[in-house]
Image (spheres, grey):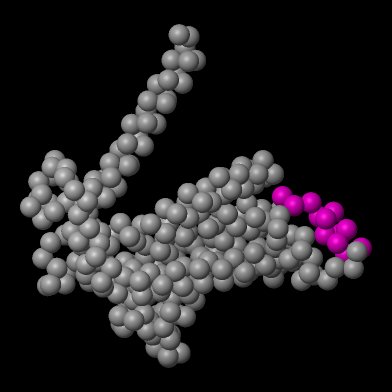
Amino acid sequence: MNGSKRASLTLEIVLILAALLFLLPVLYLVVMTFKEPRLFYKPLAMPDRLYLDYYKLALGTSFFRSMFNSLLVTVGGLALTILVASMAGFVLARRREKLFLFFFYLFMSGMVIPTVGSLIPLFKLASLLHLINTRTLLILLYTAGFIPFASFLYSAFTKSIPRELEEAGSIDGCGSLRMFWVIIFPLLLPATGTFILTNVYGIWNDFLTPLIFLNSPDKMTLMPTIVQFMFNKQSTNYGPVFAISVLAMLPLLLLFVLTQKRMLRGLVMGSVKG
């Protein structure tokens, strides 16, 4: 075995060990949800039958309502951010006037403002606008928080698109808006995939924002619901908590399995184009 093959084999072994290191806690969590109460506090004991009572108890709570709320704010926040940031990034990449350069740096400054420091002003502003305890507020907050990074991302990708495409569109009679949606936006798919992959988990797993700005159980998202369920006095064991945690992971795992090839292909296309 030459040096190159030995290095490749060593790298594969290290990557397999790293994958196991990340997978073991997840596998342990899943196994725990199938353990009967008599085995639950024995870490090395394996379930001897398929015990589903924890899942039945978890599904009997407000799980589906909280999942719907999480799905709504996640899709809404990502879609609105993509809509606004893609157009803003296109304009900021193409216009060189000082006014647009000022807006570019203004957008970028949003990436260095600490989130915790802006919570009190945001809460007061939301109270004045009567948006407290609404899912609309969460969508607007996520959109405002992600626009600086997304605009920077779209601006960088737009610079890699030849201006000749826009000139050809203008010759064919495309207006600015139609040219953006028909010609430019499809070419920004790698940027859109990158943005979704890097931010969908942040919104889905966010605990602090809904806890501060929501106070109704009907509007609450998954993460605060899981924590409230964990501290519920009626729940004296962690079995149902583990079960509801596994159920909360399933949509993101499904999304990753269904889209990872297409998303990674888009990322590679974007890197080659850049």
Depicted 127 relative to depicted 172: above or below: below
- Residue 82 is left or right of residue 119, and the answer is right
Q: Quadrant of the N terminus?
A: top left
Q: Position of residue 51 (x, y in %)?
A: 19, 54
| Residue sitting at the far left | 38
Q: Position of residue 26 (x, y in %)?
A: 29, 47
- Residue 130 is left or right of residue 45, and the answer is right
Instruction: Please give the name of the residue rendered at 42% of the width and 20% of the height, measured from the top-left corner.
Output: 9
Instruction: Please give the name of the residue rendered at 10% of the width and 55% of the height, measured from the top-left corner.
Output: 37
| Residue sitting at the far right | 171
Q: Position of residue 23 (x, y in %)?
A: 32, 42
Q: Position of residue 45 (x, y in %)?
A: 13, 42
In magenta segment, residue 167: yes
| Residue 224 visible somewhere in the drawing | no
Residue 21, by quadrant, is top left
Depicted 205 relative to depicted 123: above or below: above
Q: 23 and 173: which one is in front?
A: 23
Q: 11 and 229: which one is in front?
A: 229
| Residue 69 visible somewhere in the drawing | yes
- Residue 37 is left or right of residue 161, and the answer is left
| Residue sitting at the far front | 49
Instruction: Please give the name of the residue rendered at 51% of the width and 72% of the height, measured from the top-left corner.
Output: 76
| Residue sitting at the far top | 1
| Number of marks present in the image shown | 0
Instruction: Report the magenta residues as a range.
Output: 160-171
In magenta segment, residue 207: no
